[in-house]
Amino acid sequence: MHAAAGHQDTIFALATGAGRAAIAVMRLSGPASGPVVDTLCGTRPSPRRSSVRTLRAPSSEILDRALVLWLPGPGSYTGEDCAELHLHGGRAVIDGVAAVLAGLGLRPAEPGEFTNRAFLNGRMDLTEAEAVHDLVAAETEAQRRQALRQLDGALGQLYDGWARRLREVLAFQEALIDFPDEDLPPGVEEQLLGTMRDLRAGIETHLNDAGRGEKLREGLYFAISGPPNVGKSSLINALAGRDVAIVSPQPGTTRDALETRVILGGVPVTLVDTAGLRETHDAIEAEGVRRARLRAGQADLVIAMTEAGTALAPDHGGERHILVANKSDLGGLGPAGALRVSVLTGEGMDALRARLAAEARALTESEGPPPLTQARHRAALLTALDRLTAALSADLPELRGEDLRMALRAIGRITGRVDVEDILDTLFRQFCIGK
């Protein structure tokens, strides 16, 4: 549990989107929340019971007739005294209430400040705070499910469990250092080594997840690759449902990578249309070909395109790929194993979409413990893994103890149990105002 933040100021922010709407929610948090509600409403509503009240400025001017919620701490989102004003969504109403709140000594919240206070007051750990941000930013059902699972504390519980076992190992290790001549239970050291090996194996398994959680959170990259004039630009337009790329019978029309975002299998995917792969003396086209090969090598999946009239598999440069033979309406089977389609007539396109959706799910779905979702989690766990490996091979008990402390500190940084000041600003400034 974190120490209380001890904030003396009270903040407010609009928690709903900007623009005209039926309802706008203004959130308050801090010690002055209750007295401000008293001022606006005349009497404070019962805790956690919504109440329709007439809001008045200190001058007695009516501001709005609103639904008011009084949420005393510590059982609130931030752990502080909070309130919500469900206003009519007109710009004049919002601005008028905000001006009165500022006049009463409240200040506008910084991005992510509500969730920052929730963390500092022990209402959530850092993995849960990150999940709040991911949930707000979720584009798909799969992203929503992953964020909710993390918000429920599943990821934090996994890391806390490892940290707890490390603390137990470290406690015994310190006993071996401080009391070398005492009669400690037999086999203590071998038990410690066994626990350390188990922890290392668990962290290694968690790290060897092919980046599934991070890929779902950030989205996948699928590159469309192949020789000129096989229909790459037509395919990206068909998959996107709009004109993304210029379609022309002239070879070499696409000279740079064009990107568009689509949803496949509940996963956000950026489709990349690349330049046709061929030998060329045109310097600009040659640079496009170089970039196309680079993007194919970096892509999560390459859609390697050719024509159904050729039996040669196209050059694509991607480790994970599917073969697509376009222009099936003109005849031909294409290379062995290729999925035959006609972007022009739509033949085979449903099968292609289903195959791409299946590939997207296969690249992101995971079973068992919740997957890694953040690059900083991976970096901290790699440090912990290195320190555990060093501890297992340490010759001196003092060196082993130091390595164990460093491993514990690395895992603690993920949930925010230790050494979090350097990452708080980076995390919370990603949030929108009012969250």
Image (tube, rainbow, N blue to C red):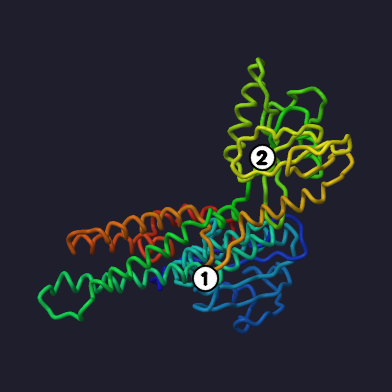
Task: Using the image as rendered, state which of residue 374 and residue 111 is in the foreground.
Answer: 374
Q: Are discs 1 and 2 less than 8 Å apart at CB? A: no
Task: Report whether residue 9 is seen.
Answer: yes
Q: Quadrant of residue 393?
A: bottom left
Q: How many marks?
A: 2
Residue positioned 75% across, 25% down in the render: 253
Q: Which mark is residue 154?
A: 1
In what element is the residue under mark 2? strand
Residue positioned 73% across, 23% down in the render: 252
Assign the N terminus to one quadrant of the image. bottom left
Frontmost of labels 1 and 2 is: 2
In what element is the residue under mark 1? helix
Q: Quadrant of residue 329?
A: top right
| x and y, in percent, of residue 186 in the image | 20, 79
In the rendered view, does 242 fall on the left or right side of 106? right
Mark 2, Cα crowd under 10 Å, few <14 / some 14-19 / many 20+, is: many
Q: Which mark is residue 261?
A: none
In the rendered view, does 235 fall on the left or right side of 37? right
Residue on which the image places disc 2: 223
Kind of residue at badge 2: Ala
Q: CA distance from mark 1 to mark 2?
A: 34 Å
| x and y, in percent, of residue 259 in the image | 69, 39
239, above or below 407, in the image: above
Assign the C terminus to one quadrant of the image. bottom right
Task: Report whether residue 105 is seen.
Answer: no
